[in-house]
Image (cartoon, helix red, strand yellow):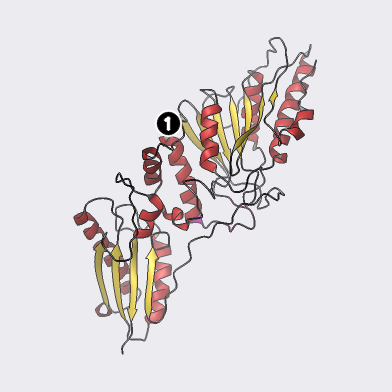
Amino acid sequence: MRYRIGRVLAASTMAATSLFSCGDDDGFPPEPVAIACPTESGKAVTLVVGARANSPAPKLPAEIEGLVREAAKQRQKVQVIRVDGEPSVAMTAIFKTNGNNDTIRNGDLTNFVTQVSGLVTQLQPKKPQADVLAALTLAGRSTPKGGTVVLMDSGIPTTGPLSYKNSEMFAAEPEEVTEFLGSEKLMPDLADLSVVLAGVGDTADPQTVLPENYHKQVTALWTELAEEADAECVHTLGAASGRTAVPTSVPVDVVTLPKPPVFRECGTTVLANSSPVGFVVDEAEFRDPKAAENTLRLLARQVAGQSQRIELTGTTSSEGSVTSNQDLSERRAAAVKKVLIGLGVEGSRITATGAGEQWPGRVRDTTADGTLIPGAAARNRSVVVKLTCDG
């Protein structure tokens, strides 16, 4: 009897389905899989699939097909979890075959892998929005130890504690995110599991393409999260194949990216840490010096040939001591001043001061027990530019 799962694939978008058949030891020889993590194939595989709006339509990369194939040979569990507003298991399968010769057995194996791949491309969401953290948590609970979890999603949640509908999440430091999740007991358990990130940071229309700095931040966040969740290893696969999402009527909100700074002739502009004029953690060094210079060049052009006074005020989150934050805020304002002078703005027109964590526009950035709230902390880190006109 050959292995058959075709009939249940269409139904699997409606309910989780266990797929299995009886058979003797099939004796499939192992084949190499061209992927550094996991270090050993032939273990259980869980595919966490973002078949949803605003994330590229999923397609199994060759490396992941290889992991599924090797898991099937060893009769290891293969499952698919849908990423939507309430993630759920869409399919569970264990491959076996009664084929009485290599041709039949190999055909059954190929059929299994093909149909798992087909399910991934046909998968549909059930609930509005996307809770990527909940999907990864479910994968951690349901994947046998030694297995691999593959996250195939943009990695941009629109609900749950990591929702990027708060655009300040694009400036959240990954280490602070994991500390916050740990303090709130929201970290997934990925111990003894390998994690592969496939297409994380890639989006589909109508979601805007992420600029390189935001793409890196999203990838870094999920990498850090997996590592801090005790994953054995974390591996990132290349870009998704396109910018078309699966056709679905289940809504997912489009995430608004942080707006670029706009400098007016007279007035105040906040250079948020999510802007190109953002800084390395706990340093007065720009994350991307070239991008910072390009943005500050717009300010230099705005004041060229005019007489505005330029007041720069650095601000920080409440992480660290009051004294260290005051010092950091002053040094960051001074760093912006230095670039402006290099762009031709007279130093005598510029004042650079720091307000540390005690400036009037700050938001509360800690929980009741003192844990830093990543998005709020990112919002409080800035350099405020005030242009004062004569008269």
Q: Residue 353 sits in which quadrant?
A: bottom left
Which residue is at 51% across, 22% downward? 145
The residue under label 1 is 230
Q: Is residue 49 left or right of 145 when viewed as pictured?
A: right
Quadrant in which the C terminus appears: bottom left
Q: Position of residue 322 (x, y in %)?
A: 21, 55
Pick the front one: 49 or 304? 49
In the picture provided, is 30 more to the left or to the right than 323? right
Residue 211 magenta-highlighted? yes
Q: In this view, does 203 lie above or below 178?
A: below
Whether residue 158 is situated above or below residue 345 in the rendered picture: above
Marker count (numbered): 1
Of residues 218 and 110, the one drawn nearer to the viewer in this rendering:
218
Q: Is mark 1 on a helix, strand or loop?
A: loop
**x then y, percent, for residue 240:** 62, 46
x, y percentage for residue 288? 40, 58
Relative horizontal placement of residue 291, taking residue 142 as reference (left or right): left
State the residue in front, 336 or 89.
89
**Residue type pointed to by label 1:** Asp
Q: Main secondary structure of the magenta part?
A: loop
Q: In which quarter of the image is the N terminus?
A: top right
The structure residue drawn at horizontal position 67% and vertical position 21%, both measured from the top left corner, is 94
Q: Magenta span covers which residues?
A: 202-212
Q: Is residue 108 left or right of residue 320?
A: right
Question: Does residue 36 appear in the picture of this structure?
Answer: no
Instruction: Give the x, y percent position of residue 181.
Output: 41, 41
